[in-house]
């Protein structure tokens, strides 16, 4: 090649690599920003903050070991890959508009992450073929470990793990000579304590963490596929075993010292269990590294040398230039800016809104005493304003509880509050839901009736429990089912540019009270709790 041709190829090489780098930085900045909402408000994925650091560490370690040569940058992108990438770029603006309006919608979260992964692998292939994907593309698969699983799948897995954990722990307590009874909803009843296995105690967090750690160490030490699969499988077994040991330890503490000591050791035991899981995974990684040296190393090296000596096949496709990556970067950033502008504008056809429901803090209920909200609940819901109180019914001294939360505009934590509903949370405390929730309304001193969902539960010892639960976004009563808003409502919010409206949550619990009695009492109290207000 002539010096002029070499210089031209060198300029194209630099433009292509810098353009591809800019595209991947822009792409993953958007993807990580979207995932960070789950990492912040979903306790099952809070370890996700460590994945960008893991990814950066692997990529930094690979720098200088697989830089594409001038000829490698002339690799062609297969036509099928080009069309898929083009379709992903075309759908990106719509994906971002829906994603910004619904950061808790796991379907859109998966679509966002998979689009980023597809475009990244296609870009790396265009830079240096399959070698570049092996060198720099495989580490991006770690991000899959911190993408929230579909809601129905995760809930099914949590229920399965809860049942397995409760069964094993109950049998182990019997072997230790402690009388224990497993009850529905993952409840273990002992002589002087009742242990409820909640979501965080099922081992689901350890499973997510094990998957991320196994993928990281498998890629860092370049284990073969067989070794990586073995590491993931063994890590899952370790997570379940360690979590069972944690639950047994907490059960022993509760049996000997009561529930007060259980509250003190609960979080400490969870942190210690995760540290033990990571440590055992490290030991398993060392064992697999030692086995790798005996996995037909000579045959593997001979096959690799033979493969490298063969001429690379000519693939029909498109050779992208550097300007294509620059334009794709502008498209990604422009789509993000346009989507943000869509939600920042004030719709011109917005009608005068109806007065929203509000409740004073504390409500004007006779005999109401404030309660301290658990720190875990405050952190989980992340409300701008919250209150909790209790009072007793006069005739039979039956306890009542009231909780209220308030989120300002553009607080994504309000969307995640829809995932913590009575039908999801109370069964973990030993209550059985009797029939589906019903939408009821109560007359107030205002012109509009107050609408709310009513739930009927029954404890393991037959005590009835009636719960009134409602979420209100501005002037709208949220009618979403378990797991959040309906798909139609989510798409409407994106189309209308609603964003995150000001949201309030109200929950009133009537203990040892039938549904009819609770409804009558709620009818009497509602005017002292909820009032119509004006928007600030």
Image: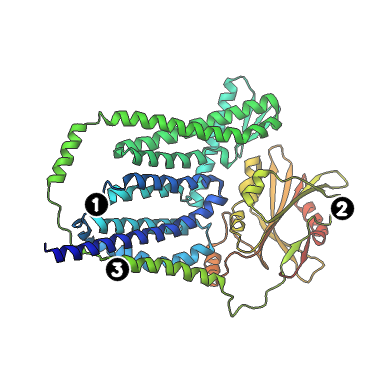
Task: Identify the residue position indicated by label 1 in the image.
Answer: 130
Instruction: Locate residue 107, reporting x and y percent.
Output: 47, 57
Judge left or right: residue 518 versus residue 237: right
Q: Quadrant of the C terminus?
A: bottom right
Which dot, 1 or 2, sits closer to the camera? 1
Judge left or right: residue 321 versus residue 117: left
Judge left or right: residue 299 versus residue 172: left
Q: Quadrant of the N terminus?
A: bottom left
Q: Which mark is residue 323?
A: 3
Instruction: Locate residue 232, reporting x and y percent.
Output: 39, 38
Residue at 56% x, 35% y: name it. 271
Residue at 16% x, 39% y: name it. 303
Examine the rendered structure and indicate whether residue 37 appears above or below residue 500. above
* CA separation in Å, label 1 and label 2: 72 Å
* CA separation in Å, label 3 and label 2: 71 Å
* CA separation in Å, label 1 and label 3: 22 Å
For marks 3 and 2, the one nearer the N-term is 3
**Are the residues flagged by discs 1 and 3 in contact, CB closer than 8 Å?**
no
Residue at 59% x, 24% y: name it. 173
Task: Identify the residue position indicated by label 2 in the image.
Answer: 366
For marks 1 and 3, the one nearer the N-term is 1
**Residue 17, quarter of the rendered image:** bottom left
């Amino acid at each position: 090649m002539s010096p002029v041709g070499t210089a031209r190829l060198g300029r194209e090489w630099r433009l292509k690599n810098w353009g591809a780098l800019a595209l991947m930085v822009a792409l993953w900045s958007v993807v990580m920003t979207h995932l960070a909402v789950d990492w912040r408000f979903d306790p099952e994925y809070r370890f996700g903050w460590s994945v960008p650091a893991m990814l950066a560490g692997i990529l930094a370690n690979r720098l200088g070991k697989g830089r594409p040569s001038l000829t490698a940058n002339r690799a062609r992108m297969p036509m099928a890959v080009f069309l898929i990438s083009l379709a992903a770029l075309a759908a990106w603006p719509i994906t971002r508009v829906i994603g910004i309006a619904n950061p808790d919608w796991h379907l859109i979260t998966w679509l966002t992450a998979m689009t980023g992964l597809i475009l990244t692998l296609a870009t790396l292939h265009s830079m240096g073929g399959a070698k570049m994907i092996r060198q720099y593309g495989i580490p991006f698969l770690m991000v899959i470990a911190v993408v929230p699983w579909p809601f129905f799948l995760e809930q099914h897995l949590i229920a399965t793990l809860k049942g397995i954990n409760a069964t094993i722990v109950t049998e182990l307590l019997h072997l230790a000579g402690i009388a224990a009874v497993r009850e529905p909803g993952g409840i273990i009843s002992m002589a002087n304590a009742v242990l409820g296995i909640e979501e965080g105690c099922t081992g689901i967090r350890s499973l997510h963490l094990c998957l991320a750690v196994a993928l990281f160490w498998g890629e860092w030490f370049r284990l073969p596929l067989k070794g990586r699969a073995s590491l993931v499988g063994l890590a899952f077994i370790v997570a379940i075993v360690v979590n069972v040991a944690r639950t047994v330890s907490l059960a022993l503490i509760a049996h000997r010292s009561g529930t007060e000591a259980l509250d003190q050791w609960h979080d400490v035991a969870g942190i210690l269990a995760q540290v033990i899981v990571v440590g055992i995974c490290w030991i398993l990684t060392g064992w697999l590294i030692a086995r790798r040296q005996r996995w037909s190393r000579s045959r593997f090296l001979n096959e690799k040398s033979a493969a490298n000596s063969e001429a690379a096949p000519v693939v029909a496709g498109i050779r992208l230039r550097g300007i294509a990556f620059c334009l794709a970067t502008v498209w990604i950033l422009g789509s993000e800016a346009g989507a943000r502008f869509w939600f920042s504008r004030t719709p011109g056809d917005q009608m005068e809104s109806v007065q929203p429901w509000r409740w004073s803090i504390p409500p004007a209920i006779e005999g109401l005493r404030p309660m301290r909200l658990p720190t875990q609940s405050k952190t989980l819901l992340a409300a701008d304003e919250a209150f909790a109180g209790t009072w007793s019914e006069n005739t039979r001294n039956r306890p009542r509880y009231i909780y209220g939360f308030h989120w300002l505009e553009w607080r994504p934590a309000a969307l995640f509050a829809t995932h913590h509903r009575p039908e999801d949370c109370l069964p973990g405390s030993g209550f059985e839901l009797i029939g589906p929730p019903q939408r009821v309304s109560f007359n107030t001193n205002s012109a509009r009736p107050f609408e709310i969902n009513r739930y009927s539960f029954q404890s393991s010892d037959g005590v009835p429990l009636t719960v009134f639960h409602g979420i209100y976004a501005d002037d709208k009563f949220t009618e979403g089912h378990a797991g959040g808003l309906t798909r139609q409502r989510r798409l409407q919010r994106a189309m209308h540019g609603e964003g995150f409206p000001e949201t309030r949550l109200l929950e009133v619990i009537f203990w040892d009270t039938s549904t009819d009695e609770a409804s009558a009492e709620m009818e009497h109290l509602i005017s002292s709790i909820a009032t119509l207000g004006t928007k600030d």
